[in-house]
Image (tube, rainbow, N blue to C red):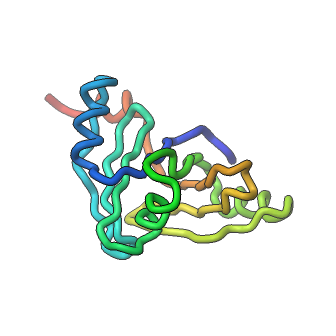
Amino acid sequence: MFETIDRIVVAVRDLDKAKKQLSNLLNVDFDLPLVDEEYHMRAVYSLFGLELVESTKPGSIIDQYLDARGEGVFRVVIKVTELDSAVKHLEMNGVHPVGEITVGELHEVAFHPKDFHGIQIVLAEYSSNHPATIAALKTP
């Protein structure tokens, strides 16, 4: 059910600047930016396990986080194989979701930081093959 830590999400004020800096410092490649108009955010993912997010609208949840805490770890995403079962497990232990998002085939459920020692935990379910499988299946 709980598979692995999928990624650490870092809230930043300037996505392009943070992406460039972390790419240079850590030799990390990031995918092209994705924009989510509904949640007012722009994000980039890396196979390194980092996601960088910035607000695209004043007052968004990312903007509120940045105003309250500044740049830093926004949430930790855990990949699960059975999202409904994982959510039920947490609910049976007194932890309840505070939000959810679906983008394409990605479905995520967020939990309040107070339930996880100050870290917002997000459970994510999506089907995927291991990157080595994807690479092996590509034809040159």
How many numbered markers are drawn?
0
Reply above or below: 137 against 57: above
State which quadrant residue 98 falls in: bottom right
Q: Residue 67 or 95: which is nearer the viewer?
A: 67
Residue for point 42% across, 39% down: 50
State which quadrant residue 92 falls in: bottom right
Residue 51 image offset from top left, x and y in percent: 40, 45
Q: Residue 44 or 81: which is nearer the viewer?
A: 44
* Residue 126 shown left or right of residue 140 in the figure: right
Residue for point 44% across, 36% down: 49
Residue 108 image offset from top left, x and y in percent: 54, 61
Outermost residue toward the right in this view: 93
Outermost residue toward the left in this view: 140
Q: Residue 116 or 97: which is nearer the viewer?
A: 116
* Residue 55 shown left or right of residue 62 in the figure: left
Q: Residue 93 or 56: which is nearer the viewer?
A: 56
* Residue 140 shown left or right of residue 10 in the figure: left
* Residue 132 shown left or right of residue 74 in the figure: left
Residue for point 37% across, 53% down: 53
Residue for point 67% across, 57% down: 113
Image quarter of the C terminus = top left
Residue 34 image offset from top left, x and y in percent: 28, 57
Residue 134 image offset from top left, x and y in percent: 33, 35
